[in-house]
Image (spheres, rainbow, N blue to C red):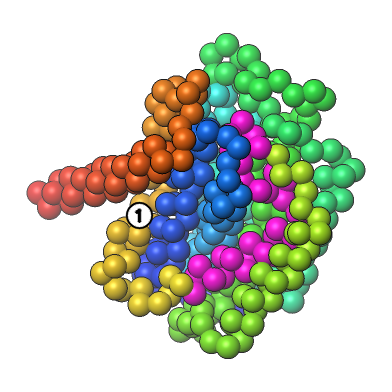
Amino acid sequence: MVTLPQSSKRDAGIDIARGIAIIIMMGANMGPVLHEPHSLFMRMCSSLAAPIFVLLAGMMIAHHAGARSWLKIGKRVGMLLLWAAFTDMAAWGIRPFLGVDVLYLVAIGTAVTYSLRNVPAAALAAIIMAIAFATPFLQESLGYTAYPTGMELLSGNVTVVVKQQTPVWHHYLIDGWFPVFPWLAYMLAGLMLGRYRWGNSSTRSLTGSKWGIMVTGCLAIGGVMWWLHPGAMYDRQGFSELFYPPTVGFFIASLGAVLAVLTLAGISPTSRYWRPVRFMGQHSLFIYVAHSIVIGQFFVKWWQNAPLDKEPFLLVYSLFLLSMFMVTAAMQYAIFKIKAG
């Protein structure tokens, strides 16, 4: 039996890492308003947000599993699905439950990861690797769409016409925005990492020579595998992350990148310099939904016919980050004042 932690206290380093993911994700989701082709630097940076976000979601299962029941997990899954559906409709004006955006994956992964919370580490590692290495075979045998099904909310018209479009169940399995293969493996890797960090009633540091070797090894081995077999790297209507489709090399290399971010986030996590990033990480779900609505309902409509060049894009992005921080802070202050009486 795996010993799971009971504490629900926030981990500053994890909040910082989640904040880093949100900051990157905001820029990545602004991709449709940036003039194409996007630079390799932009595409690589954008590709880091989702692995961080999803792996941290798995870590949180380990952090809170001892204090949660299946009833609480069911409520959590339901809430995530509601937010996912709301974001599809309110931000992008499309019918929900079709393309499998990241919150759908986290909802599914929450249930699966919680069910595997007591599986021994060796067996869990085997499941993770089985998912990762099965992914390219499923992509090859079942096919991989260039763009998953999207339908306008009211008219039902298809948003992007793709020849030989795959069915919706196929999107959940292998070719949606964030399908189970291989993205569930990130959540399960997060479960393993969470056990390591918070197991045995102590918080372990994600540093040291052995940790550095593991990070470097993942980056080097995954990087070589990814370079040899990069995959199609589709650009999905301005969303230009390099994981459409994800490959085994990308999975391993991105794991190394996430571990490196966690190491960075663990350096003086209580420093005042980290506070803005940490704050955004503490309110990641609100910021994710809010920034999606702004991009989908305003930015894309303003600039879809005249996309921004690099310098204007960076200016808008910087102001967008600042505004989201200020809106979130104002909301929290208002909630605090209401609760205070």
Question: Residue farthest to the right?
Answer: 141
Q: Hey, what amino acid is under mark 1?
A: Met
Question: Which residue is depicted at the point 39% across and 32% down?
Answer: 294
Where is the N terminus found, in terms of image quarters? bottom right
Looking at the picture, does residue 173 appear above or below residue 237? below
Question: Which residue is depicted at the point 61% across and 14% down?
Answer: 156
x and y, in percent, of residue 77 in the image: 53, 47
Looking at the picture, does residue 253 appear above or below residue 271? above
Residue 203 versus residue 305: which sits nearer the camera?
305
Please say whether residue 79 is visible from this viewpoint. no
Residue 70 versus residue 32: which sits nearer the camera?
32
Decide whether residue 136 is among the magenta residues. Answer: no
In the image, is 341 to the left or to the right of 238? left
x and y, in percent, of residue 146 in the image: 73, 33
Query: Which span of residues is magenta-colored?
Result: 235-263
In the image, is 166 to the left or to the right of 31? right
Within 10 Å of disc 1 (Cα), the crowding (few <14, some 14-19, many 20+) is many
Question: Which residue is depicted at the point 35% across and 46% down?
Answer: 318
Question: Residue farthest to the top?
Answer: 155
> Tag count in the figure?
1
Question: Residue farthest to the bottom?
Answer: 209
Where on the picture, by quarter, is residue 45? bottom right
Please say whether residue 13 is visible from this viewpoint. yes
x and y, in percent, of residue 262 in the image: 50, 70
x and y, in percent, of residue 42 in the image: 54, 48
Q: Secondary structure at mark 1?
A: helix
Residue 79 versus residue 283: which sits nearer the camera?
283
Question: Residue farthest to the left?
Answer: 341
Where on the picture, by quarter, is residue 250? bottom right
Decide whether residue 260 is among the magenta residues. Answer: yes
In the image, is 270 to the left or to the right of 338? right
Q: Which residue is mark 1?
A: 280
